[in-house]
Amino acid sequence: MNRVLQDIQPSATLAISSRARALAAAGHSVCNFSAGETDFDTPAGAVAPTIAALEAGETRYTPIAGLPGLCRAVAAKLERENGLHYDPAQILVSCGAKHSLANVFFAILNPGDEVIIPAPFWLSYPEMVRLAGGVPVFVSAPESQALKITPAQLSAAITPRTVAMVLNSPCNPTGAVYSADELRALAEVCVARGVWLVADEIYEKLVYDGARHVSVASLSPAIYRRTITVNGFSKAYAMTGWRSGYTAAAPEVIKAMSTFQSHTASPPTTFVQHGCIAALEACDASIVEMVAAFAARRERMFALLSAIPGLSCVKPMGAFYMFPNISATGLDSRSFCERLIDRQHVAAVPGVAFGSDSHIRLSYACGLAEVEEGVGRLAAFVSTL
């Protein structure tokens, strides 16, 4: 067996979600706060062109980078919405943003290269880096800093082996959103030290309370040249199962990623790409309704969590997660989540998977009624500790 894989941890999110589905299948009432998947349907404006593409026989291979029409649509979106100019040849479409990120790390890392990852972090970042032969280096983003790192912390973490840093804003699992000034300060450190900045912008559309998503690559020509931007369709367009994401970067990065993708996944699914074109060009109205619903759920979940003695939570400004601190309960995050699902049938993800054993992650990408019922059960559970 592959020795590297023996040290890689399976996804805690998927494991908890599977447990929740098994309990539901057995007839239990489960409140599932584990999955990073919206309960909204994919917009009809993306579904219909996909069906039409299938009926028209669009089932053969596309170019490795994706349909030229989709690469053009992505480039147009980045110009229109993010202030980023990329030639369509600088776009690589892959099988989801997760696949895009894996391609990035395999393209830019050599054995022993270091990648700086702010913690708490999305649980797949360090495992992807390890699979590509790299070494994850964690920098703490404490609650006292609104769960964000500083330029001084970043600079101190860079060594001669540092090749890249990962920046996820809005952040999974914390919901933290970096301002333009904060992004610029971090990016300027990367530019000065010759470090790639891998910008995971998958939650860009999901921001609240006047927060504004800023694409870090838009902040200066020098930052643009050092930034690798990753995004996709799963969150904004409720297209998780469609598996489509993309990368925009310097030509040499896209060339390396394309070579890697050509020997692993080949091009992404053809008919799905037709739906993605339609999503970018005609489905933004659906996002407004979804964000409004998430905003209401966020307010309700935060209010209910804040009323539970023994829990505290920094209010998230983006994505669709809460990251409450459970340290006052005396339980580690894994024990907390195991007891919670056993006793109250509430599924939450242990924070240890995200780099903080003092927290748990709760997704509010579910109905308001489930938010209220689930947090009520959570409060009842905490009261017994």
Image (cartoon, rainbow, N blue to C red):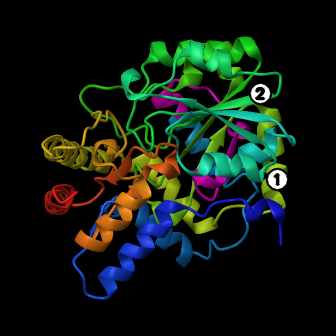
Residue 94: image quadrant is bottom right
> Tag 2: residue type?
Thr
The residue at 75%/40% (across/down) is 135
> Tag 1: residue type?
Phe
Residue 156: image quadrant is top right
* Coordinates of residue 155 in the picture (x, y in percent): 66, 15
Query: Which residues fall within the magenta stretch?
Result: 78-99
**Is any atom of residue 68 visible in this view?**
no
Q: Which mark is residue 155?
A: none
The residue at 49%/28% (across/down) is 82
Q: Which mark is residue 162?
A: 2
* Coordinates of residue 42 in the picture (x, y in percent): 37, 62
The residue at 35%/37% (across/down) is 318
**Is any atom of residue 326 visible in this view?**
yes
* Coordinates of residue 308 in the picture (x, y in percent): 15, 46
Q: Which mark is residue 260?
A: 1
First in sequence: mark 2 vs mark 1 = 2
Could you tell whether 151 is left or right of 227 in the image?
Answer: left
Q: Nearer the viewer, residue 2 or 256?
A: 2
Whole-number angstrom distance, CA of label 2 to CA of label 1: 22 Å
Q: Is residue 17 above or below residue 233?
A: below
The residue at 60%/53% (across/down) is 98
Q: The N terminus appears in which quarter of the rendering?
A: bottom right
* SS category of the residue bearing label 2: strand
Residue 111: image quadrant is top right
**Mark 2 in CB contact with mark 1 (< 8 angstroms):** no
The local crowd at label 2, few if under 14, some if 14 to 19, many if 20 or more residues have their Cα within 10 Å, is many
* Coordinates of residue 47 in the picture (x, y in percent): 42, 66
Could you tell whether 192 is left or right of 28 in the image?
Answer: right
